[in-house]
Image (cartoon, rainbow, N blue to C red):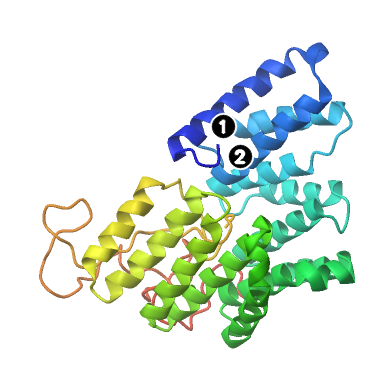
Amino acid sequence: MRSASPSEQRSALKNYANWIHYTAGRRADIRPTLLVSFTTEFARLAKVLGEPGDAGIIDALDRAIELTQSIGRSTAQLKLAKAACYGALVNEHEDRRSALVDAVDTAAEGGPVWAEAMLNLCQYYADTSHYDHARSVIKRFRDGVSADSLARRYECAASVYEGYIKVVSMRDLAGAERNFERALTFQEMADHDATVAMWISMAYYQRGRLRQMRQNYTEAIANYRLASQVRSRWAHDFRTFAFINLRIAESYTAVLDLDAAERHLQESADSSMPVPTGARDGSSAVWPERPTRLPVAVRRPGSRHWSAPGTKPEPSASTEVSCCASAACSCSTPAAAPCALPCGSGSP
């Protein structure tokens, strides 16, 4: 399943949802071990793909949560999947926050599912401009995992998310660089730990964003490529790779390498997913990010993406992306340029 195409994965997710409803009507036939395996894979797919159209995935997850509770098993992963589905539709939503809080409360504190839930909750607060809440969650995360686990593994995650909060809040970007450098000291673990690989990929991605802001496009592209390479060793997360390709295309557009930009735009379009309302630059699931606009500069005749008015970039509403790419942002600074405006709805 992990090597299937986006359309095949979406089709499989819908089949899982249909079988959940079918199973709910035949509870006497439920085998607990099989149900747990089934719902675990359903949750994994739902976290990656979100809600593809009107597939009814959130309703199916509610059914799966009910069934799993009835056999006395943990529902934390299903609640994380439910939060991810809401996140694919809209960035800030009380049901998304509530699902994350429920997952934290349901999971065993200090364990891997609890850690995942805490990091997702931190990202939710950062993406919705509640930076103080995000910092509090990371502090609780550090206190909740054992000292040995923190030093051996979770320091990577804590450093990445501390840096992420600084990037999306546009505060202490030099400190964010130090956070990402600390996270990258765990890089060797990415060869045998898929979760650490995700954190390392996120660190490279955010370093790319910082370099793109400073208009250092060569280093930005190099970091985006490293983010993609690390992540691709473990899973083909189509949404993640779509957004990485968008960022690479933006950087190539900025230096007018239009052939390379168009290639990466096409790769992004081939695996594109719906963008949630109110998306911030830096989100994940993603991992990390959900940009709101395609980069458009010099257009080329005969192409879906380009039509040429001349040899210089032509400004348009589509090209001017805010510093944070927030739908709520009112500034018109190109994404690649530094911006000092306190964009968003809740800057500290």
Residue most toward the bottom?
Answer: 174
Relative image position of residue 45 (x, y in whole percent): 60, 39
Relative image position of residue 59 (x, y in whole percent): 65, 30
Figure quadrant of the C terminus: bottom right
Q: Earlier in the sequence, mark 1 or mark 2?
A: 1
Q: Is residue 232 above or below residue 167?
A: above
Q: Quadrant of residue 256?
A: bottom left
Q: Quadrant of residue 300?
A: bottom left
Q: Which mark is residue 13?
A: 1
Figure quadrant of the N terminus: top right
- Amino acid residing under circle 2: Ala
Q: Which residue is mark 2?
A: 46
Q: Is residue 77 above or below residue 183?
A: above
Check disc 2: other Cα within 10 Å, few if <14, some if 14-19, many if 20+.
many
Residue 133 falls left or right of residue 233: right
x 53%, y 78%: residue: 342
**Could you say which is closer to the camera, residue 121 or residue 26?**
26
Check disc 1: other Cα within 10 Å, few if <14, some if 14-19, many if 20+.
many
Residue 82 falls left or right of residue 29: left
**Could you say which is closer to the camera, residue 63 or residue 225?**
225
- Amino acid residing under circle 1: Leu
Q: Is residue 23 visible?
A: yes
**Could you say which is closer to the camera, residue 149 or residue 233?**
233
Relative image position of residue 344 (x, y in whole percent): 54, 69
Whether label 1 touches label 2, CB < 8 Å:
yes
